[in-house]
Image (tube, rainbow, N blue to C red):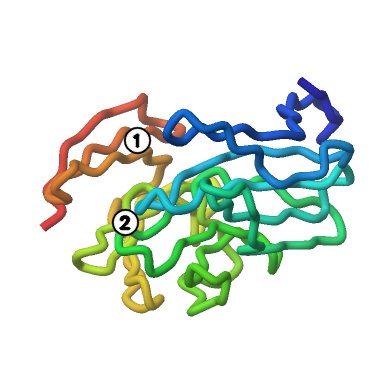
Amino acid sequence: VSKYLKDEKLTPIEKENTWVLTSENKIVWVDEDPNADQYTAWPVWANDSNELLYQVLNRDQDDLVILATDPSSGKNRLLYEEKQPTWVDFFNDIYIFKNGTGFILRSDKDGWRHLYLYDMNGNEINRITSGEWVVEKIVCVDEENNKIYFEGWKDDSFDRHLFKVNVDGTDLTQVTKGKGSYTSEISPNGSYFYSQYSNFNQPAVLNLYNLN
């Protein structure tokens, strides 16, 4: 474990230089430089299991790449790269579409953390959200109806709400109402959600809602 100073706090980040994959009792070494001074994290399988995606951040933490590894050979291909003059964070909630057409990133590359849609070759298809506000968490992606549910704040940074938006960026709608901070979870069939909220005058309350 390596500790790196961020915002006057020690932030532990796991540092690994070599990955091992096992397939049919075969050890496959991922094609990486074992001497590179970098951080490797957030592995996630593509839905067809034909590739393993993982992220590599340089020691200065201003250049991050997402690599896709062939588990049969260990060879990498560059899927995405983001450079910033100050700081780049790991993408801890990448969403990969089940049909293999692309993925959603939550990036602050324009100074505000927003959602972007990419194909599986790393080409940007469209920007999903924009503006001087922040997307804080992807809650659920309804692929059948091409909708994304996420938490964030828009008009007041003291509030946190559940929003929905179409994958193409249209029809942005705030789902939860009223002043306060809402933390929400959507049911597996997408019909209901519960939300816990509170504000300066209201202790935490948990409510169940019908999304329809």
Q: CA distance from mark 2 to mark 1?
A: 22 Å
Q: Against 80, is 177 above or below?
A: above
Q: Against 118, is 179 above or below?
A: above
Q: Amino acid at mark 1?
A: Tyr
Which of the image's four quarters has the C terminus?
Answer: bottom left
Residue at position x 45%, y 45% from top? 45
Dot 2 lies on which element? Answer: strand
The residue that disc 2 covers is 141
- Pick the residue in front: 151 or 74: 74
Image coords of residue 123 (percent x, y): 56, 76
The dot on residue 8 is none
Dot 1 lies on which element? Answer: strand
Q: Is residue 36 left or right of residue 42?
A: right
The residue that disc 1 covers is 197
Q: Amino acid at mark 2?
A: Val
- Pick the residue in front: 145 or 51: 51
